[in-house]
Amino acid sequence: MTPSPRIIVSHPTGNNFVRALIEELNSLDQLERFYTTIGIGKEANPLTRILASRRNYSIPDSRISRQWFPEACRLLPFGQGCQEQRRRRVDQSYESLDLKVAKELHRYPGFSLHAYEDGAVESFRMAKELGIRRSYEMPIAHWATVRRLLAEEAERLPDWEPTLESTREPESKLVRKETELSLADCITCPSEFVLRSIPKKIREEKHCQVAPFGSPPSSKHLKKASGRRSQGPLKLLFVGSMSQRKGLADLFEAMNQLNTKAITLTVLGQPSMPMSFYRTRYAHFEYIGPCSNKEVRRVMKKHDVLVLPSIVEGRALVQQEALSCGLPLLVTPNAGGEDLIEEGRTGFLIPIRQPQILAERIECFLNHRVERHEMGQFCQETARNYPWSTYAKKVVDFCL
């Protein structure tokens, strides 16, 4: 019998889409090695798994190779520092893991390597020398698109410029991104928006695909809208970093235009500026700090609509999390979820930088509260059409 093709996966932090991929590979007996910073497999002792509770994986611990020291230094209190220092320590963690993979690739002749943006340049160079297939994943739009859109935002809304961290990435990091793309054999994107952002020359030279992220399990039962939910205020929810990359300034402007107690806004996320900055732009939102996925879902179930007027994303996972909780979406194409929207059934697409149109769509939700339950059911059906297994299978098939 011919042995199954083997794949090496490298990612520093192991987020949801990485977990889905390595679990699928492990189930197919095609995962050779998972390189990460801090990570614990299912065979580790219980105390170790508790200590690394956020970096637990349901794959054998023997399949995990760690480069933990730079990441541990970043996470310790003395490793926090100013914003610029924090960004640099993140880069160091990525670069250190990349070097480790490059040094050990000679052990895996004939295998494939799947790696991610900002953490693949040295390992891809070595993989090319060794004849190892190089699969690359871009979780967000190409840096040139990001820089252009955010530079336009800085000019349009200069007081929000300090929230646009991506405008200050060093040139050396952008060179790394370009080198990674040039070395890749194939490129996976989470959305059509990301795919379209890749320069045409690269798209013509490389094999490219879209593999949408998966959704969390939908709530088993969606309660019918009570009299309070259909008669009380329309409850909007924004989830994400409190930046203009996520379009928060446009959402605040839309709320100011509406100026009604019939609509409330909750903002859940990490502030980039003092809270007083946000309150002077729109005073009447409820604030919830960053919290666990379980708590985010609990908050979602108390709201009516997820609003995310993003300027640039890859594919905001929060969109599918909201759908799985029965929340319709009010989002831009640049949030990376165009395929999730069936107008009037799962929500609405709005253009970027258009607070007036955003306000009109919010009013549309307010004026059609009786359809809320039917929309919620359709949202959950849509979320179920995006299992993580489908995402993982597309990446696996593309790697080989």
Image: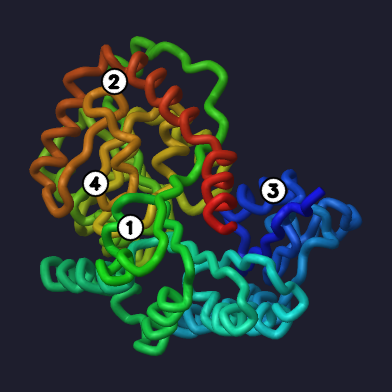
In the image, what residue type sits under mark 1?
Leu
Q: Which one is earlier in the sequence, the residue at label 1 or at label 4?
A: 1
Tag 4's secondary structure? Answer: loop
Whichever of labels 3 and 4 marks the residue nearer the N terminus, that label is 3
Query: Residue at left 20%, top 71%?
Result: 148
Instruction: Identify the residue at image location x=80%, y=56%.
Output: 41
Is residue 35 or residue 109 the one in the foreground?
109
What residue is pinned by disc 2? 232
Q: Are marks 2 and 4 in contact (CB under 8 Å)?
A: no
Q: CA distance from mark 1 to mark 3?
A: 25 Å
Comparing labels 3 and 4, the label whose residue is closer to the camera: 3
Residue 28 x %, y %:
72, 45
Q: Secondary structure at mark 3?
A: helix
* Badge number at residue 195: 1
> Circle 1: is it few (<14), some (14-19), or many (20+) Cα within 10 Å?
many
Q: Which mark is residue 332?
A: 4
Residue sitting at x 28%, y 59%: 312
Q: CA distance from mark 3 to mark 4?
A: 31 Å
Amino acid type of the residue that numbered disc 4 sits on in the rendered structure: Thr
The secondary structure type at the circle numbered 2 is loop
Q: Amino acid at mark 3?
A: Glu
Q: Could you tell me the amino acid type at mark 2?
A: Gly
The answer to whether any part of residue 92 appears in the image is: no
Q: Residue 313 appears at what percent x and percent y?
A: 34, 57
Which residue is more in the foreground, 171 or 221?
171
Left or right? Give the position of 142 relative to 125.
left
- Work out which quarter of the rendered image holds the C terminus and state it: bottom right
Q: Are discs 1 and 3 less than 8 Å apart at CB? A: no
Name the residue that disc number 3 marks: 23
